[in-house]
Amino acid sequence: AARKSAPTTGGVKKPHRYRPGTVALREIRKYQKSTELLVRKLPFQRLVREIAQDFKVSFAVVFINFENCTIGS
């Protein structure tokens, strides 16, 4: 009983790929362990101020004042 051999493709090996979700789980663990800031302080501060400004305009809040250390911490 002779077996049919699969046609060879010239020895081209496919690159290694992890299963879907494996790399995502690795990244989740990495960022949960880390303590560094993922968003830089000044861009985040500008974003918070912009959102607070929109909040003041739409809901007529009298006064919102941020100290420098409040947003950065």
Image (cartoon, grey):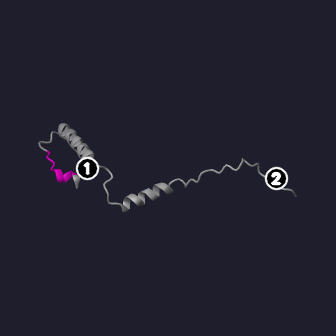
Please tell me how crowded label 2 is: few (under 14), some (14-19), or many (20+) other residues with Cα within 10 Å. few
**Circle 1: element type:** helix
Q: Which mark is residue 41?
A: 1
On screen, residue 11 above or below 35: above
**Circle 2: element type:** loop
Q: Position of residue 4 (x, y in %)?
A: 82, 52
Region of the chain picked out in magenta, as a range: 64-71
Amino acid type of the residue that numbered disc 1 sits on in the rendered structure = Lys
Amino acid type of the residue that numbered disc 2 sits on in the rendered structure = Lys
Q: How many marks?
A: 2
Q: Quadrant of the C terminus?
A: bottom left
Is residue 57 shown left or right of residue 44? left
Residue drawn at x 65%, y 51% is 13
Residue 43 occupies quadrant: top left
Q: Residue furthest top?
A: 57
23 falls in the magenta region: no
Separation of residues labelled 2 and 1 (CA atoms): 64 Å
Mark 2 highlights which residue?
4
Q: Position of residue 61 (x, y in %)?
A: 14, 42
Residue drawn at x 33%, y 52% is 38
